[in-house]
């Protein structure tokens, strides 16, 4: 377990995009895939104006420049189109971006979790194991409930409800209000400004800076609510959120996942809910191991979080998984509970007709000593 922690720490602190792609370190934002081509970034530094998913800026910029990975995406039918007034969007920027690019129904209505996990997410390099953990297994404990969720059609805005069926939304989100305080479905620019202020005027974002930003959001919510609502499951999902963002958007350097991403790419995902033009997916780069390793680094990134973290979660990838599957009396899952969750994951893989070797790897990681 410690090996993954050290690997992720090394990746974050030494193999950043400036090392792998020097283009990111100068004033010109050059495409690493096409030397000599410059692309004006859609966003400036963190202190520049914020755009919103329903008003994502000048339509003339929505089409990606020729020769970029985004242009190939456009040609394959996955062009960016923001939601219309009757389209459904939820609290998850990543799923909203998939709808905006047509990886599933652009309306965001009557979508199916099985298709999202095994088709849409894999299209942007996310392994189905981590997709299942975030999308279903973090909330159900019975096979019958999992069967119902996998076959159920739902609208993306249903994910905002604090309900046992769909509860992807969690407190102290980067861009959404807490359920108890207001609209937890729509992008809130005031909350996002807290995050950008914490990141500062930097060109890159890493797990530590996003960890500090999460700490700032927790402090803000605590001040407004009068108590700390950031319980262990929210902490775990917050860590996974950071891991998903960085493993998906980080460039590759020397063939390894880099725990750092250009700020422009992160702002594109959160503010426009759009995939960056000069980004392309790497198959299965975003998997349980990489996501949890960077999630741990984010928890270590800010002193404000340590008190909350130490109350209910061990600072290891295994500890994050355990926090998701705690029982109602807050006891940590034992080997039997872990095996039960893995068996439900294997069922989902079988239903989708996919090989479950990734589940075997997760079993060795989570259950094995």
Image (spheres, rainbow, N blue to C red):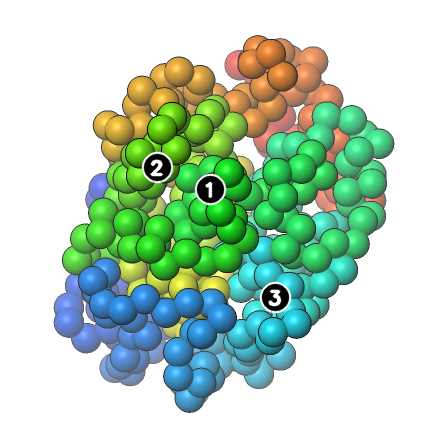
Residue 99 is labelled as: 3
Q: Residue at x 82, y 48 (%)?
A: 151
To which residue does mark 1 refer?
181
Q: Residue at x 59, y 30 (%)?
A: 362
Q: Give the CA separation, mark 3 to mark 2.
A: 33 Å
Q: Is residue 53 visible?
A: yes
Which of the marked residues, 1 or 3, is nearer the chain's N terminus? 3
Q: Give the CA separation, mark 1 to mark 2.
A: 9 Å
Q: Residue at x 45, y 81 (%)?
A: 62
Q: Residue at x 69, y 20 (%)?
A: 339
Dot 1: what SS? loop
Q: Quadrant of residue 58?
A: bottom left
Labels 1 & 2 near each other (Cβ < 8 A):
yes
| Nearer the observer, 366 or 211 | 211
Which of the marked residues, 3 or 2, is nearer the chain's N terminus? 3
**Image position of 16 with respect to 76: above or below:** above
Between label 1 and label 3, give the one nearer the viewer.
1
Dot 3: what SS? helix
Residue 303 is labelled as: none
Residue 233 percent across, percent down from the top left: 51, 28
**Image position of 360 with respect to 85: above or below:** above
To which residue does mark 2 refer?
224
| Nearer the observer, 19 or 320 | 320
**Image position of 316 with respect to 147: above or below:** above
């Amino acid at each position: 377990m410690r090996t993954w922690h050290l690997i992720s720490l090394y990746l974050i602190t030494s193999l950043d995009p400036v090392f792998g792609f020097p283009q990111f370190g100068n004033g010109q934002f050059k495409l690493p895939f096409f030397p000599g081509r410059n692309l004006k970034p859609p966003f400036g530094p963190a202190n520049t104006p914020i755009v919103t998913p329903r008003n994502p800026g000048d339509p003339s910029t929505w089409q990606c420049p020729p020769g970029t990975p985004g242009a190939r995406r456009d040609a394959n039918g996955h062009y960016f189109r923001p939601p219309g007034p009757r389209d459904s969007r939820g609290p998850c920027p990543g799923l909203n971006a998939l709808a905006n690019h047509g990886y599933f129904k652009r309306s965001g209505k009557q979508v199916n979790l099985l298709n999202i996990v095994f088709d849409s997410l894999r299209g942007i390099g996310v392994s189905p194991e981590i997709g299942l953990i975030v999308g279903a297994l973090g909330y159900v404990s019975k096979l019958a409930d999992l069967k119902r969720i996998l076959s159920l059609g739902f609208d993306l805005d249903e994910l905002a409800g604090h309900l046992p069926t769909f509860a992807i939304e969690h407190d102290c989100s980067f861009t959404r209000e807490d359920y108890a305080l207001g609209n937890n479905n729509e992008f809130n620019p005031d909350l996002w400004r807290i995050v950008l202020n914490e990141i500062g005027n930097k060109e890159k974002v890493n797990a530590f800076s996003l960890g500090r930003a999460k700490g700032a959001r927790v402090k803000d919510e605590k001040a407004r609510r009068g108590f700390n609502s950031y319980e262990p499951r929210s902490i775990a999902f917050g860590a996974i959120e950071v891991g998903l963002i960085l493993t998906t958007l980080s460039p590759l350097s020397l063939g390894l996942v880099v725990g750092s991403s250009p700020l422009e790419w992160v702002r594109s995902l959160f503010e426009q809910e759009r995939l960056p033009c000069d980004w392309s997916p790497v198959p299965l780069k975003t998997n349980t191991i990489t996501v949890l390793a960077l999630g741990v680094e984010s928890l270590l990134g800010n002193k404000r979080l340590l008190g909350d973290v130490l109350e209910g979660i061990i600072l290891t990838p295994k500890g994050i998984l355990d926090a998701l599957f705690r029982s109602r009396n807050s006891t940590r899952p034992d080997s039997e509970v872990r095996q039960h969750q893995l068996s439900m994951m294997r069922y989902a893989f079988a239903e989708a007709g996919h090989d479950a070797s990734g589940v075997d790897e997760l079993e060795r990681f989570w259950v094995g000593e």
